[in-house]
Each structure stands twice: as C-alpha cells, then as structure tokens.
Image: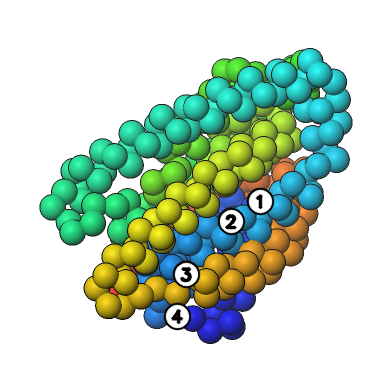
C-alpha cells in the first residue's frame, strides 16, 4: 500500500473516530474507493493501529480533566475503576456473545468464519449508521429540551447504572461497522441521565481500555494469517505492515486532537443532534455506493 493511501486513511480515521460518525464506516468506504480489501488481515491491523493513534490523542486531550475528576483522590479513583471494570465486563460479554453467534450462524460454512469477513459489507454498514444516527439524534434533541442541571454525582463520574448501559451498548458496537462507538455510548449516557460532559469523559476512558485488547486480537490474527500464507507460498510482510501502521498512527493522533476539539465544542453548544443527522445522510450515501457496486 502506498504511503499516500495510508495517510488518507489515517486522517479519515483520526477525524471520524473521535467524532460520533463511525470511523470504521468512513475508513471502509475510503478503502473501497481506493480499491483496498477492508477484510484482509493487513487492513484490519492497520485500522487497529490507527485506533491506537487516536487512543493516545484521547489520553493527551482528556488527561487534565481525568486528573481533576477520576484521579482527584484515592476514593474517586476506586469508584471510577469499579465503573470501568463493570462497563468493560459487559462490553466483553455482550460483544463476544454477538460475535460468536454471527460466526456460527451467518458465517457458518465459510472457509474462515471470522467476524472480520463482514467488515467490508456496505449493505450492513448503511443500516448500522442509520441506527447510530437515530440514537444520536434522539439524545441530542432530548438534551436540548432538558431543563435544569443534572444531579450531582460523587466524583463527577457516571453512576453504576449509567456505566452499565454505556458498557452494554459498547458491546453492541463491536461487531458492527457503522454503529459509532463514541456516538452510541455518549448518547446512551445522556439518555440515562448523565450530563453530556460526564458521558463524553467516561466514554473515551472506556475507549482507552478497549483499544489494547483490540490491537492484540488483530496482531494475533495477522500472525496466524502470515503463517498460513507462508505455508501457501505467498508470505505476508509483517514488518512492513507494522511500520505502515505506526506511520498511520502518528497522522491519526494529530487528526484525532482536531476532532476532539470539534466534538467538545459542539457538545457544549448543544449541537450533538447534528451528528445524528450526518449519520443518517451518510447511511444513504453508503447504501448508494453499495447499489453502485462497491
């Protein structure tokens, strides 16, 4: 893959990952338009490496806020940690259950029954974008109508109930490209009564927890595919794939910082619902590309 294509994908990923518009959907569409295979091990590893770049952007951007809230005291950190573990456990259980169900039903009989085989299917991405758009739109409109301040929560964090809902919805996002993780989780937090600032802060803290296991999964998948390819006489360049991914991660990092400033400003200004409208329009565009043969 050319360096130019990697940079394009990194910028698309960095901007779309941290905006509630589904980075995966945008990257898959970009890959399709550039003639790349989104379901190949090299491409899924690149996507996860780009996620790593945006993860560091999240850490840099939110670190000051996290220190003032989650790390302000030992007790505040313990409460935050319990919520993160609870939400992440629900994500893992729900996400893995859905992935295994899909692999054993929809992909039954396929040479490789891996969920990644569905990642390039635009006819699946389009409805996922629409669902995410509706969720964001509803949350945004309800937020605009809500009067008064949110009740004070100890440690300026979300409640256990809110964390559970956010973690459960995050689990639903894992198998489906187009179902924006940040859009769905922040909207869920808002719909369950959390302020948009708390929902945003907690959602991205969960993203930091989720990224390392996702990277590990794709590295193992690429290593396995490399062994199979070598045995078949068509080896995969692992070293090159990692270097390409690292370059992309750097560009995704800087694009992610830009996206986070944009996201926070629109949240503060009550424009969250506009992201929902965008997702609905994007869903129509993706479906149009599918009908056009992409």
Residue at image mark 2: 51
Q: Is residue 43 depicted above or below 149 in this figure?
A: below
**Real-space Cα distance between discs 2 and 3?**
18 Å
Identify the residue at horizontal 35%, vertical 58% (top origin): 224
Residue at image mark 4: 34
- Dots 1 and 3: beta carbons under 8 Å? no
Q: Position of residue 245 (x, y in %)?
A: 57, 67
- Dots 1 and 2: beta carbons under 8 Å? yes
Disc 4 versus disc 1: nearer the observer: 1
Q: Position of residue 172 (x, y in %)?
A: 42, 38
Mark 1 falls on what kind of element? helix
Residue at image mark 3: 238
- Counting residues from the N terminus, which is met first, the one under dot 4 or under dot 3? 4
Residue at image mark 1: 55
Mark 2 falls on what kind of element? helix
- Counting residues from the N terminus, which is met first, the one under dot 1 or under dot 3? 1
Question: The C terminus lies in which quarter of the figure?
Answer: bottom left
**Real-space Cα distance between discs 4 and 1?**
25 Å
- Counting residues from the N terminus, which is met first, the one under dot 4 or under dot 2? 4
Q: Position of residue 201 (x, y in %)?
A: 71, 37
């Amino acid at each position: 893959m050319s360096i130019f294509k990697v940079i394009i994908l990194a910028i698309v990923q960095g901007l779309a990952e941290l905006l509630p518009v589904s980075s995966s959907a945008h990257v898959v569409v970009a890959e399709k338009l550039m003639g790349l295979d989104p379901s190949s091990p090299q491409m899924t590893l690149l996507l996860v490496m780009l996620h790593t770049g945006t993860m560091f952007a999240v850490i840099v951007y939110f670190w000051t806020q996290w220190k003032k809230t989650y790390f302000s005291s030992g007790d505040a950190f313990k409460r935050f940690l319990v919520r993160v573990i609870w939400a992440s456990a629900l994500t893992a259980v729900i996400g893995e259950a859905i992935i295994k169900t899909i692999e054993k039903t929809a992909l039954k009989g396929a040479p490789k029954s891996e969920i990644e085989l569905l990642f390039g299917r635009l006819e699946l991405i389009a409805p996922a974008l629409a669902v995410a758009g509706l969720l964001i739109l509803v949350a945004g409109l309800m937020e605009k109508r809500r009067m008064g301040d949110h009740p004070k929560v100890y440690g300026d964090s979300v409640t256990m109930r809110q964390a559970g809902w956010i973690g459960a919805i995050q689990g639903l996002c894992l198998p489906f490209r187009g179902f924006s993780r940040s859009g769905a989780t922040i909207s869920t937090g808002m719909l369950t009564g959390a302020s948009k600032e708390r929902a945003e802060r907690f959602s991205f803290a969960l993203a930091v927890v989720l990224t390392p296991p996702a990277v590990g999964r794709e590295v193992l998948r690429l290593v396995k595919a490399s062994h199979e390819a070598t045995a078949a006489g068509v080896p995969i360049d692992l070293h090159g794939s990692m270097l390409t991914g690292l370059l992309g991660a750097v560009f995704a990092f800087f694009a992610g910082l830009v996206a986070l400033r944009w996201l926070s400003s629109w949240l503060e200004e009550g424009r969250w619902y506009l992201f929902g409208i965008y997702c609905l329009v994007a869903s129509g565009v993706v479906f149009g590309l599918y009908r056009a043969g992409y």
